[in-house]
Amino acid sequence: MLLGRTANGLYWMSRYIERTENMARLLDAGLRMALTRTASSSDEWNSVLLSAGAEHAFNQKHQEVTAETVSDFLLRDPANSSSVMVAIETARNNARMVRTALTRETWESINEAWMALKRMLASPVDQRELPSVLDAIKRETALIRGSLHGTALRNENFDFAQLGTFIERADNTARILDVKYYVLLPSIAWVGSTLDNYQWESILRSVAAHRSYRWVYEADYRPTNIADYLILNGRMPRSLAFCYLNISESLSYLEKDYGTRHCCHDTLDQTLSKLRVNSIKDIFDAGLHEFLIDFIRDNNRLGDEVAQNFRFY
């Protein structure tokens, strides 16, 4: 049986790698949405902080919400435990702790990503350079994922890494959807407008789903279609359903490997049943916000139970 300390390191390594990419994608979406505004773009940047769960920490340090202050806080600020620089450094520290459980290629890709981002984010990023910096962050994390998937033995090490990736990804997608629905639109009058469509498009871009959505829905930006795609479509790599299918697979392998079923398996089954039974109409009728808040709570509980059941601490 894998030591809890090793399982913990692999799990959190993957969560923070995923978080590194998610922060870059959130900033990219904020940048695109801000460009649609002729007046103040502070609402868009504030929504980015909300999605990142960083509004309180940001307000303790900054008086004004601007592109410069938000991007610096989410990219470089050591006071922000989820900033890109802190996240990649935490991922690397966890990877170093479980170095013998990783392939050489995986460790080297993490270490090289950390060195590249440390150089890139050594000083505040000029706003003109922000798009290229965000692309570089996404590229570095993609290289880590590629090396892991291309070289890792599909054993318990891989399963704990997968759990970290998909619990973090599901949380991110749910938060982005919830913030979009309740914060980004300035008023009900904008619903269905060009601005509304552009904002939905930006959200799709933030979860790498813009082009694939158009393949399925032919660029018809309806809230129900987008919510259906990001919640219930099991083939879309950042949807809640896709994340939970992968979590289910990893927990099933761990149950077989250890011959033990834990309470985290029951929590998983409850969430999976909601994703399988409900249609998007059912979710909207009951309240999208309520569904997402319940999902985020249950997803957090699952993460806590995985840590307890497999003795991470």
Image: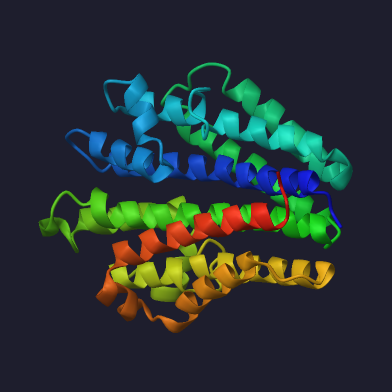
Picture residue at 52% right of the left edge, 45% below the top: 22
Picture residue at 27% right of the left edge, 69% below the top: 287
Q: Give the left or right position of residue 287, taking residue 49 as reference.
A: left
Seen from the viewer's position, the closer of residues 230 and 97 is 97
Image coordinates of residue 41 in percent, x first then y, are 24, 35
Picture residue at 60% right of the left edge, 47% below the top: 18
Image coordinates of residue 222 in percent, x first then y, are 29, 69
Q: From what the image shows, is residue 118 above or below residue 8? A: above
Image coordinates of residue 207 in percent, x first then y, are 48, 55
Q: Quadrant of the C terminus?
A: top right
Seen from the viewer's position, the closer of residues 98 and 236 is 98
Q: Give the left or right position of residue 63, taking residue 275 as reference.
A: left
- Residue 247 lies in quadrant: bottom right
Q: Give the left or right position of residue 96, taking residue 183 as reference.
A: right
- Residue 255 lies in quadrant: bottom right
Label tally = 0
Q: From what the image shows, is residue 210 above or below residue 134? A: below
Picture residue at 70% right of the left edge, 50% below the top: 145
Q: Quadrant of the N terminus?
A: bottom right
Is residue 66 visible to us here?
A: yes
Image coordinates of residue 39 in percent, x first then y, are 17, 34
Q: From what the image shows, is residue 112 above or below residue 145? A: above
